[in-house]
Image (cartoon, rainbow, N blue to C red):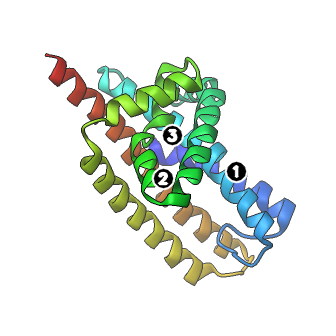
Amino acid sequence: MFAVLALGVVVPYELIVLAATGRNPFDTHASVETLILLALLDSLLVGGLISALYVHALRMIGEGGRARIGPVVARGFQALPTVVAAQIIATLGIGVGLVLIIPGIVLAIRWAVVAQAAAIDNDNWVEAIRRSGELTAGNYLHVLGLLFVSGVIALTLTNVAIALVGTHKTVGAIAVGIVVETLARSFVSLTASILFFDLLARRQVLRV
């Protein structure tokens, strides 16, 4: 189900990008402006929607029910505006913080589950930012380690795809690119969603 959810987001997005720019998912030969724009769209829209879908699917499973694609998609799209708004603010904050390096790393850790918090609570981006900071407090090393491992795995998959696909625009090359991209996105989003519930459980245990 998770693969279907991710493919349902990645495939139409990449086909639209291919039609609009003529580049496959791993073709890095484009203008800097184009690459930055696509990176932002990837992170905010594609990544945000997959995160929203995954966290709701895990919530349904965790509540003892069966996660159905229909309800998961409905809840994911309903939460998407809040998720995107929260991610925009978090991305801007982390970007500014990275100018001084350490503040940016700290903010990246504090806001590691901002998309998941926005998707579940679905109040507003301010509450999502606050909630993420609240959940990650006291777990910085745990969160940092998980972010590092998932990031390395995703980067490795991406680099392998770039080496294999390059600038080719054949059906096979595009299919390989989409599959590898889906795997990388799925791993990162699923890891972050599991982290969200892990941090939530840790906090509830401390309250008890």
Which residue is pictured at 55% across the width and 75% down the height? 161
Residue at disc 1, secondary structure:
helix
Query: Which amino acid type is shown beneath numbered disc 2?
Result: Gly
Closer to the camera, 154 or 61? 154
Amino acid type of the residue that numbered disc 3 sits on in the rendered structure: Ser
Residue 185 horizontal/vertical position (percent) = 51, 54
Instruction: Give residue 87's position: percent from left, percent from top.
Output: 58, 39
Please name the amino acid that badge 1 sits on: Leu
Q: Nearer the viewer, mark 3 or mark 1?
A: 1
Q: Earlier in the sequence, mark 3 or mark 1?
A: 1
Write the residue at 44% across / 72% down.
Answer: 156
Q: Secondary structure at mark 2?
A: helix
Residue 166 in the image: state x and y as whole percent. Answer: 65, 81
Q: Which residue is mark 3?
A: 51
Q: CA distance from mark 2 to mark 3?
A: 22 Å
User: Which residue is outermost to the front?
Assistant: 100
For residue 136, the mark is none
Query: Is 61 left or right of 26, judged from the image as shown?
Result: left
Up/down of 47 relative to 76, above or below: below
- The residue wearing badge 2 is 104
Query: Whole-Å distance between the Cαs marked 2 and 1?
Result: 21 Å
Above or below, comparing residue 152 to residue 141 in the picture: below
Q: Is residue 8 visible?
A: no
Circles 2 and 1, Cβ within 8 Å, touching? The answer is: no
Q: Which residue is mark 1?
A: 41
Q: Residue at x 56, y 59 (%)?
A: 99
